[in-house]
Image (cartoon, rainbow, N blue to C red):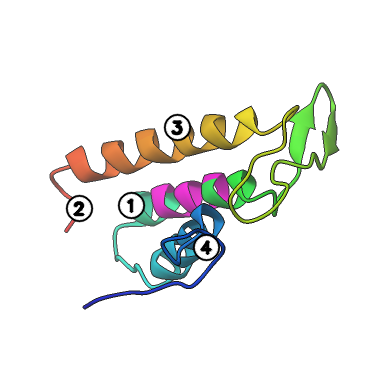
Amino acid sequence: MVYVIYGESPFGVSPKGFKRHALMLLADVHSRDRHAMKQIRAITEYVKRSLNEHPHREGHQWKRFPLWTDGSHLDEKHGHMVFDEEKKAARELLKLLMDKTFA
């Protein structure tokens, strides 16, 4: 199966578009394993946060920071948070894939 996302990059796909597509694919993942589904929900939340679709915590308050200036460029001041959230999602995904009981 081939997925094509049209976006802003010269190659026809924006980084933000890839992330949104990943969220659509994650929404289709189902398992009877409650622990696995909890991990999938966590991965989904991290990806959403990297898209700036969920607020980020600053101290005791939740705030929205502009992480993206457009579909391909990160905000100069807060864009690094995209990578922080992606790292969390990748770690959670690796834990899920390493779990031999997940099928």
The residues tagged by marks 1 and 3 sit, at their Cα atoms, a distance apart of: 18 Å
The residues tagged by marks 2 and 3 sit, at their Cα atoms, a distance apart of: 21 Å
The residues tagged by marks 4 and 1 sit, at their Cα atoms, a distance apart of: 25 Å
Residue indicated by mark 3 = 87
Q: Which residues, given as a range, are shown in magenta? A: 39-46
Tag 2–tag 4 contact (CB < 8 Å): no
The residues tagged by marks 1 and 2 sit, at their Cα atoms, a distance apart of: 7 Å
Q: Secondary structure at mark 1?
A: helix
Residue indicated by mark 1 = 36
> Quick one: label 1 or label 3, which is nearer the N terminus?
1
The residues tagged by marks 3 and 4 sit, at their Cα atoms, a distance apart of: 18 Å
Q: Secondary structure at mark 3?
A: helix
Residue indicated by mark 4 = 17
Q: Amino acid at mark 2?
A: Phe
> Quick one: label 4 or label 1, which is nearer the N terminus?
4
| Location of residue 30 (image quadrant) | bottom left
